[in-house]
Image: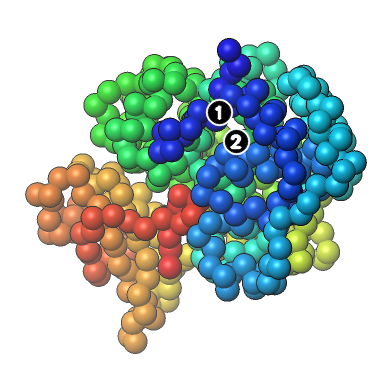
Amino acid sequence: MSKVFYRDLTTGQSTSYVELLKDLTSATHYNLYCRSKDYYVVFKSIVLSLLLNQEIILLDDDLSQEEVESQVGKIQNSEVLISEVDRVFLSRILTLDELFENITKSQKNWRITLFTSGTTGIPKMISHDFTSITRSVKQTNKHTSSVWGFAYNSTHMAGIQVFFQALLNKNTIVKLFKLGREEILKEINDNKITHISATPTFYRLLLPVDQVCPSVERLTSGGERFDRKVFESLSRMFPNASIVNVYASTEAGTVFASDGDTFSVKPNFKNLVKFENDELYLHKTIMGSSNTIQLQQNEWYATGDLIQIISKDPIRFIFISRKNEMINVGGYKVNPGEVEDVLKMIDGIKQVRVYGKKNSLLGNIICADILRTNSEITELDIRAVLQNKIQDFKIPRVIKFVESIETTRTGKIKRN
């Protein structure tokens, strides 16, 4: 029996690699613009575009028409008829070995275009070639038996990187994104998932720790600050897993990794990163291409990520905040991530969103939306803890208990 390529509990779909091969070699149309809620359609379209050596543009299913048109204009026709020559070529791919041989061949014209996450501001289009999109993929014998829990949107950078890691090692992909907590844990154990890559927001959905998942060997977290409380909880829930924190972006892919909050610069990246005024800059040679990327001195991209250097030789640093997320309160700069970290350490608090609200006297006031696991926690209880942990100007003036906290299309907390 052929290994499962993709499994989706919500649709009951379980597609093998042999079935993927049949779908690809019998295709009559190619989607230049791919927009679908069905992850299998997205994955199949990416592989088909690779085989045909053609560009593919991934459109999130929840992008508004205005967001799409602001980037790519009006889409007249996304389906392109595959030429007779290409159809003959596809029909000659008879085995999985031949399929993968053609996937990994040099693709001169192939490009994949993605949108940034849209945590703040309008999403931007970024294009990558095969080399840059698969730069972080590891292919060794030990990776061939991996089973990946897919916990991202299928059309965003983090999801695409997981997809290629799984595809190029012929792994099984199990969709976890948008499932409920009990469904996620059942899928992990039933499918013996070994690897999960997700945002801290996703991992917090799995708490509290009331069962263990022994099959998982590695957890990767990225996209947001990863607080110590979640790290310790995951260590108990996944006792056999190493936990890695990564820094990645749609513009550059995965750049740094760390076992905790402190990141280091790999020797091969030493001359490709720099820090100015506490902001991280990346060299253009590790970036995707985009008409919206502005470079300093035609060389360096300002990421907008603020960092604190811990040591200079070797370079070690921690991420503080996004530059555009800092909140000005009466002349003081408040990092919402710092306040969130303190709040999330309080027992009975599961998730938090800290944000600024315009105020005529102070410029902004700090507000906090709090998702509780213990309804007995009161605002007075929270304020009593905060008074001993952070400065007064950082304590939220408005605290609201909510039933859920809105996330972006990539699973991160939505800031505005």
Q: How is the image coloured?
A: rainbow
**Upstream in sequence: badge 2 or badge 1:** 1
Q: Label 2, label 1: how many angstroms apart (C-alpha)?
A: 18 Å
Q: Residue at the location (37% across, 40% down)?
A: 179
Which residue occupies the foreground of this view, 412 or 299? 412
Q: How many marks?
A: 2
State the quadrant of the N terminus: top right
State the quadrant of the C terminus: bottom left
Q: Quadrant of residue 28?
A: top right
Residue 277 appears at what percent x and percent y? 63, 62
Residue assigned mark 1: 15
**Residue 286 seen in this snapshot:** no
Q: Residue at the location (71% across, 63% down)?
A: 77
Residue 83 appears at what percent x and percent y? 85, 47
Amino acid identity at mark 2: Val
Q: Residue at the location (73% across, 35% down)?
A: 26
Q: Residue at the location (21% across, 49% down)?
A: 372
Q: Secondary structure at mark 1?
A: strand
Q: Quadrant of residue 74?
A: bottom right
Amino acid identity at mark 1: Thr
**Residue 22 seen in this snapshot:** yes
Dot label at residue 150: none
